[in-house]
Amino acid sequence: MPKKKFITMQQYSVLLGGDIEAIEEAGNHVAPYFEKLDEAIKANRISELSDQEFLEIATEFENTVEVYQDVVEKLNRMSAPVRFIGAHKNIQQLFTAYTSATKMMADSLDTKTKQVELTAFKQSEKDQDVYLDKFFAQVRRIFTMGTK
């Protein structure tokens, strides 16, 4: 049976950095759509969004979920330096949970009826905050430990 090949901290940092860049780009891209929808929800004015605007928001949410699912797949295929295997498993789990929460938000939008399932939407928002904070805390820990 062949030995599993581990990568160096430098190689790992480059790969993880690319994934983080993809996460941040997707988040920055979808943020204005989220803000528009969130403002409409808070003002109880979802019905004032045009069908096209609502569809565009829903589409952007779905596109973001696809980007995040791609990152999950990359994280799951990625090797980690031996001393970071446990930490890498944590970031895999946290980002998978974050992606599931993001999907729950996307799924809370019904483009046929132009409705938002508010319970799922709000729970998703809370879960995303928790998982993303924990994910980035773990990433910072890895990079801090990796430089020691």
Image (cartoon, rainbow, N blue to C red):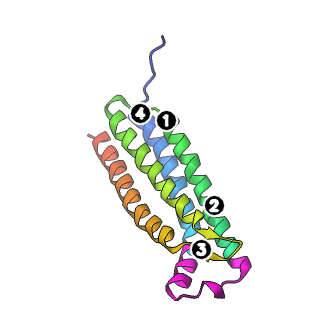
Q: CA distance from mark 1 to mark 2?
A: 24 Å
Q: Which residue is mark 3?
A: 33
Q: Are marks 2 and 4 in contact (CB under 8 Å)?
A: no
User: In which quadrant of the rendered image does the C terminus lie?
Assistant: top left
How many C-alpha atoms fall within 10 Å of the one at disc 4: few (<14), some, or many (≥20)?
Answer: many
Three-letter code, disc 2: Glu
Please name whichever residue, 43 or 137, is drawn nearer the observer in this view of the structure. Answer: 43
Which circle marks residue 62 in the picture? 2
Q: Looking at the image, which residue is at 49% across and 67% down?
A: 120
Residue 131 badge: none
Circle 3: is it few (<14), some (14-19), or many (20+) Cα within 10 Å? some
- Per the image, the residue denoted by label 1 is 78
Instruction: Tell me the SS state at disc 1.
Output: loop
Percent position of residue 125, x then y:
45, 68
* Amino acid type at mark 1: Met
Name the quadrant containing residue 51: bottom right
> What residue sits 33% from the left and 54% below the top?
137
What residue type is disc 4 on? Ala
Which residue is disc 4 drawn over?
A: 80
Packing grade of label 2 (10 A; few <14, some 14-19, many >=20) is: some
The reply to whether dot 4 and dot 1 touch (C-beta < 8 Å) is: yes
Q: Quadrant of residue 127?
A: bottom left
